[in-house]
Amino acid sequence: MLLALWTPAAAPAEVDLDDLEFRHGISQFPDYDLKYPPGFAHFDYVNPNAPKGGTLVLPITYAMDSVSPPHKPPGYFRSYDHLLERAGDELSGYYGSLAESVALSADRRTLVFRLRPEARWHDGTPLTATDVKFSLDTFCDDYLSSGWADVLEWITRVDAPSSHTVVVHANSDAAKQVHILGLIPIVPAHYWAERDVTKPAREPPPQSGPYRLTEVSQGRILTYTRVPDYWGRDLPINRGKFNFDTIRYERHLDATVAREALRAGLIDVWTENDSRHWLSSFNVPARERGWLRKGAIGSGTQRGSRFRLVINTRREPFDDPRVREALAYAFDFEWQNRALHGGERRRAHSFFANSMFASSGLPDAAELALLEPYRTTLPEEVFNRAFSFAHSDAVGIDRKGLSKARKLLAGAGYRMEGSELLDSNGEPLAIEFLSAAPDNQRILLPYVRALDVLGVEASIRMIDSVGHTNRRDAGDFDALLLRGFFAMPPTWQLRPYFHSASTPYWNVSGIDHPAVDALVDAALEATDIHGFVRALRALDRVLLWGYYQFPIDALEDTRIVYWDKFGRPEQPEEMYGEPFPDGWWFDEEKAARIGASP
């Protein structure tokens, strides 16, 4: 289990609930002023008068094996209530959803939620603290059914002292984890207590949210229907949201088929992650007539990189930082960006790229104070050089980068013999990239070719998703290509991703460094936003100069292509997360224009 080896400095003290201050919202940071006051009418970035009606059709390109919430079927988030709702227009504001109010103990190790007494399941059964405790206990204990357990390891105990009070005890600052608590679906104890939550379900279980799953069609279609008498429809966090009468998810074999379905008008919105198709695949008559549009959804709640190359430092020779740095020099991002992405991507020079938490320049005095105790264990560059990945001329073989890589490998004891790089024992330097996603080959194949030029025996091993998960969990690989996003602000991912006590599945590189552990702890125990930022920037430097992983392209707002038959609320200039599709609505007038003669 994740963090089983990590012991907090002190166990959380028992809390007298009468001594706590309950509020309508909470932040991850002690000195943070919530934007929205008690009794606010609605979020500023929604249209509270948005009309209700219409249908939204969205695609999925993966198999739907179960409709139970632990298996995360598409759209499930809207059919179950959650304790908290994040505001999209502030960095760290979380407001009561199922929770009427929330309190934090003085030592920040205990969260207490008072639930709304009017909360109901769709079958009319009251939603109570028993359901919340059952949900958190189940997801904490059962990794295989949900994937939640490893990111809830900070929870030490959940109590339900009354029907509408839930107490969550933690081994660290519990407020830093409210983001993940806001994502946990609360499931019905009265239903699942008699069933095996780990088994796939074909029939929708009881739900409580603004939508109800009403149709399941052989893994091809999931239909969610708006619940007109949803108990929480008038909560401030929900006004102006959940406007479609129906949201339908349709399965398509792959992205190519889904794009064709979009162009044919069979689906309404497509998220385009491939720059080639973004630039050229939607120049169709419907777009010329203004019916099909390209746009973006503000998604500043996630930053970092789209992908990161992960090196397994548990294995020789990848435990040698010189070898890892050499591998970084061999990756020619500029060529890939020009040849494969039409110049549309930007290199991520930080794990937290495109955010206030990214390091830049040299460390300031506050960062140095955090780094100084570990000076002898860190590369000197952490203290006196600004980090950036090598930049090529994008013409083809990056001879300059490969030359630097070869010098680093020579320092690590490798020599060229013919076309091979051999160590002192005559063993070739080899690396295998493990992948379960065929699309990853677009990134990996050019890299493999560059490594071949360098003299490295590089290969790609394609494997099914189950095998990929098992080998990742066992640390049985040389290198992986993974998604690189971080929730903003990055809190819940820090300890699973980087702490030495984490499991191989989450701490994929096997990072085991006292400075990393200390900076992760410093960030999670920071008593103000400034201390949190300082700790993350210092952590960023240590991770980058350690060359454990290589962030590739910076994550930016989400690109979409959509049929222009919807209304969208105006968004403020500083926006972290646009409410899509929850804040959109069906526009009958716009829809009537589509297909009409010009």
Image (spheres, rainbow, N blue to C red):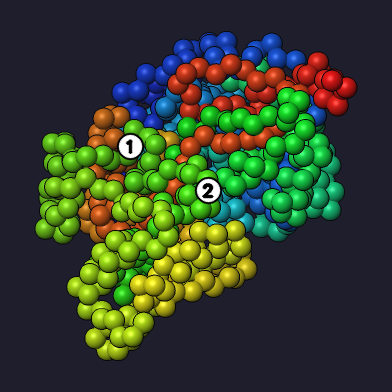
Q: Amino acid at mark 2?
A: His
Q: Quadrant of the N terminus?
A: bottom left
Q: Is residue 271 visible?
A: yes
Farthest-out residue, front: 395
Q: Position of residue 94 (x, y in %)?
A: 48, 26
User: Which quarter of the rendered picture does the C terminus lie within?
Assistant: top right
- Compare residues 521 and 368 and report the one nearer the observer: 368
Please name whichever residue, 510 or 234, is drawn nearer the observer in this view of the structure: 510
Q: What's the amino acid at mark 1?
A: Phe
Q: CA distance from mark 2 to mark 1?
A: 27 Å
Left or right of 566 in this view: 401: left
- The residue where tag 1 is placed is 357
Residue sitting nearer the eye, 58 or 327: 327
| Residue shown at 44% from the left, 47% from the top | 553
Is 69 situated above or below 290? below
Residue at 31% x, 53% y: name it: 390
**Residue 156 x/y as whole percent:** 42, 48
In the displayed image of the protein, which residue is found farthest to the bottom? 426
SS category of the residue bearing label 1: loop
Label for residue 50?
Answer: none
Q: Which mark is residue 341?
A: 2
Disc number lying in front (2 or 1): 2
Residue 275: give x, y in percent of width and height: 57, 45
Q: Classify 10 Å Cα crowding around label 2: few (below 14), some (14-19), many (20 and above).
A: some
